[in-house]
Image (spheres, grey):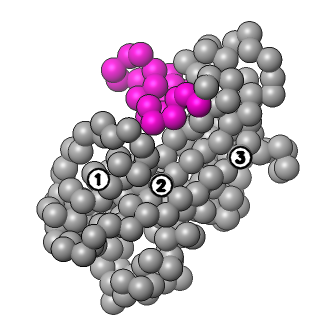
Amino acid sequence: MLTLLIATGNRGKFLEIRALLADMEIDLLAPADLDLDLHVVEDGQTYAENAAKKANAFARASGLIALADDSGLEVDALNGAPGLHSARYAPQPDATDADRRAYLLQNLSGKPRPWKARFRATIAISVPGGGIHFAEGICDGEIIPDERGSGGFGYDPIFYLPELGRTMAELSMDEKNRLSHRARAVKNARGILERLK
């Protein structure tokens, strides 16, 4: 059975990926399971570069195949921002998800709606001594000014899916695992994982 290290300290992200791969015969580990505490500087110019940096670092440290992702929210009215800087978007160093959402809405204030946006995720799978593989997923929607829903994390409460009439934070885990950018990226990565088993 393939053992796969999910290279993230984000519990929500780990649970999401675990649910997405639940039907595959893969033994999934979190860094904490191996007492791994790596901090990888995400200074790449693309999601793929950042995901690769994380996957490679965790694969080297563990000797296991490692899967990492980098994702971001791209808002058309902000010329694609926050993009690569989505997790570090608010000016204060200890900003919370709520701070980042408030800062995004502040920057959109006065700009004509709808505020078209997309979540984009790139997954990197690093095989020790065997190269790196990539998969991508995109979820289109728009930003709304009022938070709705209590599920998800990050920008989910203000990311609205017009075809469903709900925000990402109002979706059940099952719905999110069919529609989200990360779900689509993981779905696109399944073939790679099958080949590595």
Q: Judging from the image, what secondary structure is the residue with disc 1 in? A: helix
Q: Amino acid at mark 1?
A: Lys
Q: Position of residue 82 (x, y in %)?
A: 52, 29
Which residue is at 44% across, 31% downward? Answer: 85
Q: Which residues are magenta?
A: 80-102
Where 152 falls versus 111 (above or below)? below
Residue topped by disc 1? 54
Q: Quadrant of residue 125?
A: bottom left
Q: Position of residue 133 (x, y in %)?
A: 38, 68
The answer to whether 168 is drawn above or below residue 117 in the figure is below
Q: Secondary structure at mark 3?
A: strand
Q: Is residue 100 magenta?
A: yes
Q: Is residue 52 above or below residue 19?
A: above
Q: Amino acid at mark 3?
A: Asp
Which numbered tag is attached to residue 192?
A: none
Q: Closest to the observer: 95 or 83?
A: 83
According to the image, label 2 marks what residue? 122
| The residue positioned farthest toward the top in the image shown | 110
Name the kind of residue labelled 2 in the image: Thr
In depth, the one of 102 and 72 nearer the eye is 72
